Image (cartoon, rainbow, N blue to C red):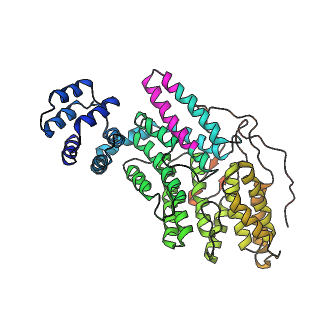
């Protein structure tokens, strides 16, 4: 790759001394290199490039070099090197290295799952701000850490935490800058992580998701997604890659919502299956958490529900889709749902009962979903309120032909909405590194259509205490 690097600098006629000064500032080349370039100022371009190439620290990776070239206002040269690096990195010897790194990241992957799950549990009135505070303290700990291995592990945690911070922010608003402060904070430390490729996947997936929400063009966000999948292709299976696949599902759901083009709907289904397949080797609780994300968006696609719980105008839900939705809801009783996802699944359940002619049941569920939306100040509350108003304007009439089916399914699902969780009165500011998976939890295979077996809970004590039980009166 060093020969490619030299060829690119020659072809792009890069100012070698300017690049060397920039790389020196990042600690990638020494002051001796700058002095040699100054002494050989009258030399030809090839000689200067040779001096620079010979003096780049051997510990510098190609990925780090690409990033720093981009930050040095050399985006074209950085892109050239990147395009050569991808096929090189996909060689088997490179994949062996990545496989080893991913295997060593098991502990950090569990941390990522837990911190992401806690965002869904509504750990505080403003999770975004709370996580930001934790991040500042963690960064302080990193700067004080002297053990190199421990320091790298803390950088991994920090990047996962910043990803969760971004998620917490986007849960409450679409007005997030895809190149704003949290992303800059990740970029600043990305090469310090144990696997920069995986850290990039986390970041790019979120940039794709946010850009698509902000944009007006149907293809907005795809440039980030393309890069994310390129990095994912050189990595072995890991939950960070699964998380990125989920972001791609959400992006294509938004494209389907805006265009009505069923080609995007098919992309959602295909990528959701890819995401579910990526979980087959994960632990049961990890598999359950992420599989429910994918299954939720599959339900939305079948029911004509958009990214932010909008009912897609003009979309006709087919009888086949209703049957698929019923089957999926029977496969998972949705026990142990987190705060935010009770709201998200609630929209799908209400929509299902509405389309089945059980308006009263749909109203019961949508009212509960709205309570969660208000409590979490989620960005979807406006769209939920609109659907709630629509349902309240429908004349009550039970579809007799589906009455027994609806009653059975409602009685199965409604208990998870019989009480609510409130914002945590006491919230921790750090998640333990030693995370013990509950050995009593068993999920046979949520992605293969078998039933899960979990006890209903809103999370560990101290994160989300249970509020006084709400009325258990259910509609008939």
Residue situated furthest left in the rendering? 43
Tell which of 208 and 431 is nearer to you: 208
Q: Is residue 449 visible?
A: no
Q: Position of residue 467 (x, y in %)?
A: 81, 44
Q: Position of residue 258 (x, y in %)?
A: 55, 68
Q: Is residue 30 visible?
A: yes
User: Which quadrant holds the C terminus?
Assistant: bottom right
Q: Position of residue 67 (x, y in %)?
A: 36, 41
Q: Position of residue 465 (x, y in %)?
A: 76, 40
Residue situated furthest front in the rendering? 42
Q: Is residue 149 magenta?
A: yes
Report the magenta stretch's main SS: helix
User: Which quadrant holds the N terminus?
Assistant: top left
Span highlighted in magenta in the image? 141-165
Whether residue 440 sits left or right of residue 12 in the image: it is right
Please give the name of the residue rendered at 76% of the width and 54% of the height, measured from the top-left corner.
416
Please give the name of the residue rendered at 69% of the width and 41% of the height, measured from the top-left corner.
123
Q: Is residue 455 magenta?
A: no
Which of the 4 image quadrants contains residue 321?
bottom right
Compared with 403, 92 (above or below) is: above
């Amino acid at each position: 790759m060093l020969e490619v690097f030299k060829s690119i600098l020659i072809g792009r006629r890069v100012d070698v001394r300017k690049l060397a000064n920039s790389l020196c500032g990042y600690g990638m080349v020494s002051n001796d290199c700058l002095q040699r370039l100054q002494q050989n100022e009258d030399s030809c371009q090839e000689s200067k490039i040779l001096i620079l190439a010979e003096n780049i620290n051997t510990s510098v990776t190609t990925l780090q070099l690409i990033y720093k070239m981009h930050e040095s206002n050399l985006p074209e040269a950085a892109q050239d090197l990147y395009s050569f690096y991808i096929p090189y990195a996909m060689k088997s010897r490179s994949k062996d290295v990545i496989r080893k790194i991913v295997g060593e990241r098991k502990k950090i992957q569990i941390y990522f799952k837990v911190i992401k799950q806690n965002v869904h549990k509504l750990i505080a009135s403003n999770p975004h701000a709370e996580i930001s505070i934790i991040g500042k303290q963690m960064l302080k700990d990193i700067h004080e850490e002297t053990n190199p291995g421990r320091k790298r592990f803390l950088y991994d945690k920090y990047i996962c935490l910043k990803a969760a911070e971004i998620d917490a922010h986007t849960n409450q608003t679409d007005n997030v800058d895809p190149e704003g402060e949290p992303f800059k904070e990740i970029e600043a430390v990305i090469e310090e992580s144990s696997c920069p490729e995986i850290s990039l996947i986390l970041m790019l997936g979120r940039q794709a998701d946010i850009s698509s929400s902000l944009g007006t063009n149907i293809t907005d966000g795809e440039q980030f997604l393309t890069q994310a999948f390129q990095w994912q292709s050189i990595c072995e299976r890991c939950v960070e890659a699964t998380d990125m696949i989920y972001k791609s599902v959400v992006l294509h759901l938004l494209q389907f919502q805006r265009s009505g083009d069923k080609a995007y709907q098919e992309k959602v289904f295909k990528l959701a299956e890819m995401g579910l397949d990526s979980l087959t080797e994960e632990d049961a609780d990890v598999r359950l958490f992420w599989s429910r994300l994918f299954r939720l968006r599959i339900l939305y696609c079948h029911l004509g529900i958009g990214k932010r719980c909008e009912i897609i105008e003009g979309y006709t839900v087919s009888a086949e889709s209703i049957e698929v939705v019923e089957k999926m809801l029977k496969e998972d009783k949705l026990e142990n749902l987190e705060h935010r996802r009770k709201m998200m699944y609630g929209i799908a359940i209400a929509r299902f009962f509405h389309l089945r002619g059980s308006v009263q049941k749909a109203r019961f569920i949508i009212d509960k979903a709205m309570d969660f939306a208000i409590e979490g100040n989620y960005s979807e509350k406006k769209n939920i309120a609109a659907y709630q108003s629509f349902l309240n304007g429908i004349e009550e009439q039970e579809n007799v032909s589906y009455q027994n089916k609806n009653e059975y399914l409602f009685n199965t699902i409604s208990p998870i909405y019989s009480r609510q969780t409130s914002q945590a009165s006491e919230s921790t500011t750090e998640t333990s590194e030693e995370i013990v998976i509950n050995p009593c939890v068993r999920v046979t295979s949520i992605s293969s259509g078998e039933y899960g077996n979990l006890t209903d809970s809103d999370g560990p004590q101290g994160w989300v205490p249970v509020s006084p039980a709400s009325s258990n009166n259910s509609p008939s």
